[in-house]
């Protein structure tokens, strides 16, 4: 039976992280700072661990190698990648500015990064400080030589375009877009299953050992869009109401689809839910608490919890007062 199971994340203690994922999202990881939690991940740099049920203690990768049918018939789950999902789901706490970076597309990554996928991302802003911002592209058109000159002269900030950020914003970061999450921003990130990042600029910071983190200028300039981009515009968002639940589409692209669900239902008015045979689904609880009933077990979902729903799942019932990101690859 294709029943859901809960996941425990891998954590990352990058130097720009904060403490909010532990304090507000219940992440019991012995890291300080805690910059990222990889909530649903089959990436070798940080696979998720199954935390309940018959697969408790196994990595999600191990489970999917044993049960490839759980991923569904999605065309992007390549036959030569057993146990791998096409997406990776994260929570990110930017206590400080992230490095200015860019990611390659699939074609470049496959050739230059050992067959890796590229990295297109979607960000849903869970919270943001009043003055929070992010870097999205360049302030004006440049060429590679000009970028190198700005970097050599320590003037990268002069050519980067900043845009304000507020809670509930969404941003689609296509591969090739120069970007950086700004300090004071807490986001849920849905991305291609890749960890390929090319740093252009890191504010001359040093890590805990006193070393500057490496930059990747040549590869970054190979893949980056150096034209000024239009400011990101928040899309028109439409909540569709049904008894006990409101839904809205946050992202839909070739790599992933993400809906936000706001549930306010009791056991008698529980919301029917099921993953079809085409794709697995992931439920990430970003606020509130509730339950998932699969007729065998009732699992509690609270803020920060993540659940994997195998393709062609058993019918589920969702209830409580909670906000979920409903994600499929």
Image: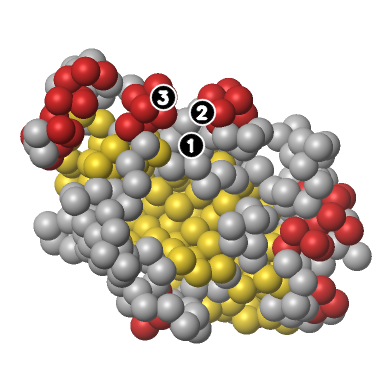
Q: Position of residue 38 (x, y in %)?
A: 53, 62
Q: Residue at x 35, y 74 (%)?
A: 33
Q: Quadrant of the C terminus?
A: top right
Q: Which residue is mark 3?
A: 223
- Please say whether residue 305 is visible from this viewpoint: yes
CA gap between label 2 and label 1 equals 7 Å
> Element type at marker 1?
loop
Residue 120: mark: 1
CA gap between label 3 and label 2 equals 8 Å
Give yes or no for contact between labels 3 and 2 (Cβ–Cβ under 8 Å). yes
CA gap between label 1 and label 3 equals 13 Å
Question: Which is closer to the viewer, label 3 or label 2?
Answer: 3
Residue 105: mark: 2
- Please say whether residue 293 is visible from this viewpoint: no
Disc 3 residue crowd, few under 14, some 14–19, many 20+, Cα 10 Å? some
Give yes or no for contact between labels 1 and 3 (Cβ–Cβ under 8 Å). no
The colour scheme used to paint the residues is secondary structure
Q: Quadrant of the N terminus?
A: bottom right
Q: Nearer the viewer, residue 76 or 110?
A: 110
């Amino acid at each position: 039976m294709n029943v859901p199971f809960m996941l425990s994340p891998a954590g990352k203690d990058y130097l720009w992280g904060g403490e909010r994922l532990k304090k507000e999202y219940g992440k019991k990881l012995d890291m300080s700072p805690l910059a990222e939690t990889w909530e649903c991940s089959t990436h070798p740099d940080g696979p998720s661990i199954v935390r309940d049920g018959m697969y408790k203690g196994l990595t999600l990768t191990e489970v999917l190698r044993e049960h490839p049918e759980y991923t569904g018939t999605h065309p992007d789950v390549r036959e030569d990648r057993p146990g791998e999902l096409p997406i990776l789901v994260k929570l990110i706490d930017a206590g400080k500015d992230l490095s200015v970076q860019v990611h390659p597309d699939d074609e470049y990554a496959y050739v230059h990064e050992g067959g890796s996928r590229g990295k297109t991302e979607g960000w849903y802003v869970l919270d943001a400080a009043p003055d929070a911002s992010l870097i999205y592209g360049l302030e004006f058109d440049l060429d590679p030589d000009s970028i190198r000159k700005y970097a050599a002269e320590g003037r990268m900030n002069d050519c980067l375009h900043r845009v304000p950020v507020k809670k509930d914003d969404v941003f689609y970061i296509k591969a090739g877009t120069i970007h950086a999450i700004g300090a004071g921003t807490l986001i849920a990130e849905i991305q291609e299953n890749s960890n390929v990042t090319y740093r252009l600029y890191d504010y001359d910071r040093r890590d805990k050992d006193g070393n500057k983190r490496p930059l990747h200028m040549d590869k970054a300039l190979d893949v980056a869009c150096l034209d000024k981009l239009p400011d990101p515009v928040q899309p028109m968002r439409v909540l569709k109401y049904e008894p006990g639940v409101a839904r809205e589409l946050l992202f839909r692209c070739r790599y992933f689809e993400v809906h936000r669900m706001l549930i306010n239902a009791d056991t008698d008015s529980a919301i029917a839910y099921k993953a079809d045979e085409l794709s697995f689904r992931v439920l990430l609880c970003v606020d509130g608490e509730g339950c998932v009933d699969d007729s065998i077990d009732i699992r509690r979902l609270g803020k920060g919890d993540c659940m994997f729903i195998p393709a062609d799942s058993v019918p589920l019932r969702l209830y409580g007062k909670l906000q979920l990101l409903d994600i499929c690859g």
